[in-house]
Image (cartoon, helix red, strand yellow):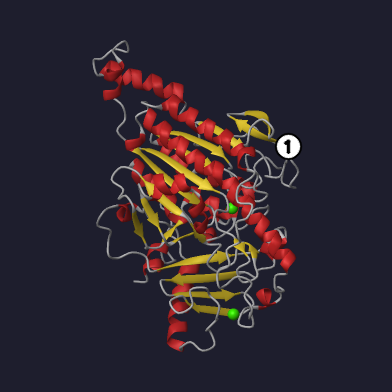
Amino acid sequence: MKRTFRYAALLALVAVMGMTASQPESGLAQTADPRPNILFILADDLRASDLRYMPNTRNLMADQGTEFTKAWVTRSLCCPSRATTFRGQYAHNHHVWVNVPPSGGFWKFYDSGLESSTVATWLDKAGYQTVLIGKYLNRYGLNRSGGYAPTTYVPPGWDEWHAWEGDYNSDTRYDINNNGDIDTYLRSDVHDTDLHADTAENFIRSTAGGAPFFMHLSPNAPHAPSYSAPEHAGMFTGTALPRPSSFNEADVSDKPAWVRSKPLLTSAKISGLTNSYRKRLRALQSVDEMVLGLVHTLQDTGELSNTFIVFTSDNGVYLGEHRLEAKAAAYNAAPRIPLLIRGPGVPQGVGRSQMALNNDFAPTLASWAGVTPPDFVDGRSLEPLLTSSPPTSWRSAFLVEHRRSPEEYANVRTIPNYSAIRTGRYNYVEYETCERELYDLNADPAELTNIYNSASQTLISNLQTRLVALKSCAKADTSATSCKTAEDGK
Ligand SMILES: [Ca+2]
Ligand SMILES: [Ca+2]
């Protein structure tokens, strides 16, 4: 539904109620929709630990909201994770496995018809004003061969559309599809995150007082090459690369062959990672300022108290942990994401250690909007955890999965296919190579010692049984265990 149509509908409603359009604004405000606005902010490749360098976000979202200290994506790669965010499904149920066609990317999502039912279409049908600003899905704005082909296409469910075209790799210019018009911007004129922030603030101001909005706001930061605004150029020039105990893991004899084949990081490699890390932190400063500007705009327009704000990421990345870069593996840093939520009734300044997944985003947004999500959704609403008395029973495990494709870039395609189960205590990984990994996260949170060969057969067999149920779980298929049942282990 278009905004103009909604405004006409609101006027009609006002007329039916015996009021006239010439009444003062307070008369209109009384008829306004009481449902909350939803602002969903999805950073790209942000690590949970990066939040320490985002003071506004910590202050406005963590101190004034709830922080999920164990939030995860179930496939740590951009496009599959974003498909999950829009649909609430594990990758084995939406089948968008990678970033490039034919097994993934925008084209897979489009060709499979998955756009016909997303959190945007659900909320749009319920009368929400929906808007996407920033990155949509990898390969949007590229043709099937990967050539640059900016598009005027707008997927169903979106009333307003300000989507990034193509890759994130031009030092000089970029294109945005603004509601069907392709506009070109110069980096020397406007930094992309700042442009998205302006677009978002303008949208909030233009819709304030009308139907509730759902905004999917997805900056490219801090994804490589981590462009930053000129005013942040001098920051973090001496900041050290984090070196957790898993950094440049000395002994990888316990690890599968694809990790054993990685050499120790050289000092040149570590300098490169340090440089990348500093660029990431600089790029994040505009995201942090964007959060501040949006909260102020919501406050100015009187919408803040009735707006849920989610701040999260599509995946983490490795910065030398286990000698790795990039993502898609099952070790902590890539599937871990930051997750901060504030809004009406959400406890402030508290943490939740229950497992929250990207599968849960779409059903959580639906529950805030009063919409029942479709049967295919695997995730669950996080609403019960956003009260002062969260339930004592919650999922006790979830699945992390990976399927490689020959088209995908080397850091991803060299990881053999695997399915992994994470419980509160264990991370157990089964590779297609028949290699196995098991980490006791209580004794070895850095995942330095694979105990598969010394673990009890009972433990292995319990984890295997649960993994079998998880990797084929599906709600729509009555012959499979539902993902909720498989995660609950009951
Ligand atoms: Ca990403
Ligand atoms: Ca080791």
**Residue 207, position in %: x, y?**
42, 26
Q: Secondary structure at mark 1?
A: loop
Residue 426, relative to residue 101: is it above or below?
below
Quadrant of residue 296 in the image? Answer: top left
Front residue of 105/49: it is 49
Q: Is residue 390 left or right of residue 355?
A: left
- Looking at the rendered image, the quarter that the N terminus falls into is top left
Circle 1 packing at 10 Å, graded few (<14), some (14-19), many (20+), is few
The quadrant in which residue 196 appears is top right
Three-letter code, disc 1: Thr
Name the residue at 58% across, 33% down: 195
Residue 289 visible in the displayed image: yes
Quadrant in which ligand 2 is drawn: bottom right
229 or 326, which lies in front?
229
Q: Is residue 373 visible?
A: no
Q: Quadrant of the C terminus?
A: bottom left
Residue 102 percent location from the top left of the image: 68, 54
Task: Report the residue that reaches farthest toward the top.
Answer: 22
Relative vertical location of residue 29 with respect to residue 47 in this rendering, above or below: above
Q: Residue at x 48, y 71 (%)?
A: 421
Q: Residue at x 72, y 58 (%)?
A: 407
Q: Nearer the viewer, residue 388 or 265?
A: 265
Q: Residue 437, percent across and down?
A: 55, 78
Tag 1 residue: 172
